[in-house]
Amino acid sequence: MVEEALRGARVVVTGAGGGIGAALARAFTAAGARVAVNDLTEESVRDLAAEIGAAVVPGDASGIVPAARDALGGGVDVFCANAGVGTGGGPEAEDAAWELAWDVNVMSHVRAARALLPEWLERGSGRFVSTVSAAGLLTMIGAAPYTVTKHGALAFAEWLSLTYRHRGIRVHAVCPQGVRTDMLTAAGIAGELVLAPTAIEPEEVAKAVLDGIADERFLILPHPEVAGFHAARATEPERWLRGMNKLQRLYEDRTGGKGEAV
Ligand SMILES: NC(=O)c1ccc[n+]([C@@H]2O[C@H](COP(=O)([O-])OP(=O)(O)OC[C@H]3O[C@@H](n4cnc5c(N)ncnc54)[C@H](O)[C@@H]3O)[C@@H](O)[C@H]2O)c1
């Protein structure tokens, strides 16, 4: 029973100001956990925190572990690295945009793990839940920085899992396609084309995460069809690339050949 595992657990959710993070915070609270919510500003999580009785640890997700530990009474059992930025474009995107995507989508996970591992290894338990994306297993049309950094987030989650699983540390990589959040709205035409048709609600992602924890599954696919796309990419890369290029051409038709920043 996942409720038994999570009752009283001290849980941190980054990027909880809306969307998937808010849904995760509500789901963990409903399962009996004590939750600390993070987003860039205090205002963006204040109402959610009041609604679910969570602690608030505002600021850049990269550096919040000490404050979260204090807010939760001295330790963290589950860390949800969920904050993310949907940086679009290709090589022409500014270095600053690539750096922000790298910093939030990858390095905030690395820094959180660095801060958490000593406590977790000493105790022989700890759970790291990484909100990656299907873009980390596949790709996202029109968004190279997002795609590349989500591949990085998945690689880091895998590395953590295989390195520390015999020492009691559990890692989950959550790889949804479209989810109806502000990020999907901001993804513009590429989002409408690729993500919107099969988009699900943030609450469905949160349910998939709790189910994945109950099953102790590394890879959590709220859209189960992603497993088939992932297998096709691995086994038939030429065919997969041709298929994705078809989507790219559709995208170019819709955007007058220019693409767009997401
Ligand atoms: N919406 C989708 O279709 C979709 C699909 C797959 C994966 N995801 C991933 O889900 C996660 C949550 O996104 P969402 O869809 O709920 O969108 P969202 O925009 O509602 O949530 C992202 C949150 O992260 C916060 N944030 C950004 N940088 C931060 C930082 N440095 N520190 C703390 N908070 C920061 C934002 O303020 C925002 O509230 C992201 O990692 C995203 O890449 C989203």
Image (cartoon, rainbow, N blue to C red):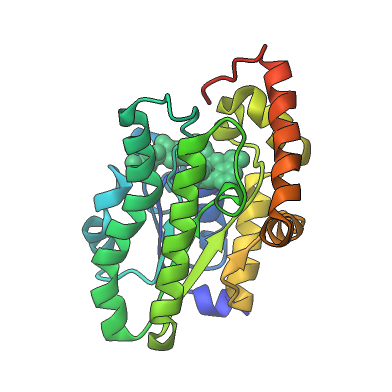
Question: Which of the 4 image quarters holds residue 215?
Answer: bottom right
Q: Which residue is at 77% across, 56% downward?
A: 225
Looking at the rendered structure, the number of numbered marks drawn on it comes to 0
Q: Which residue is at 45% across, 74% downward?
A: 161
**32 left or right of 251?**
left
Q: Nearer the viewer, residue 256 or 133?
A: 256
Residue most extreme to the top = 256
- The image position of residue 200, as x and y in percent, is 71, 44
Q: Which residue is at 57% across, 61% downward?
A: 30
Q: Is residue 260 visible?
A: yes
Residue 76 to residue 233: above or below: below
- The image position of residue 214, as x and y in percent, is 61, 75
**136 left or right of 75?**
right
**259 left or right of 53?**
right
Q: Nearer the viewer, residue 16 or 46?
A: 16
- The image position of residue 219, as x and y in percent, is 60, 66
- The image position of residue 205, as x and y in percent, is 63, 53
Q: Which residue is at 60% across, 27% downward?
A: 185
Query: Quadrant of the image for the N terminus?
Result: bottom right
Q: Is residue 51 visible?
A: no
Residue 191 to residue 119: above or below: above
**74 left or right of 44?**
left
Residue most extreme to the front = 238
Q: Nearer the viewer, residue 41 or 191?
A: 191
Residue 157 to residue 161: above or below: above
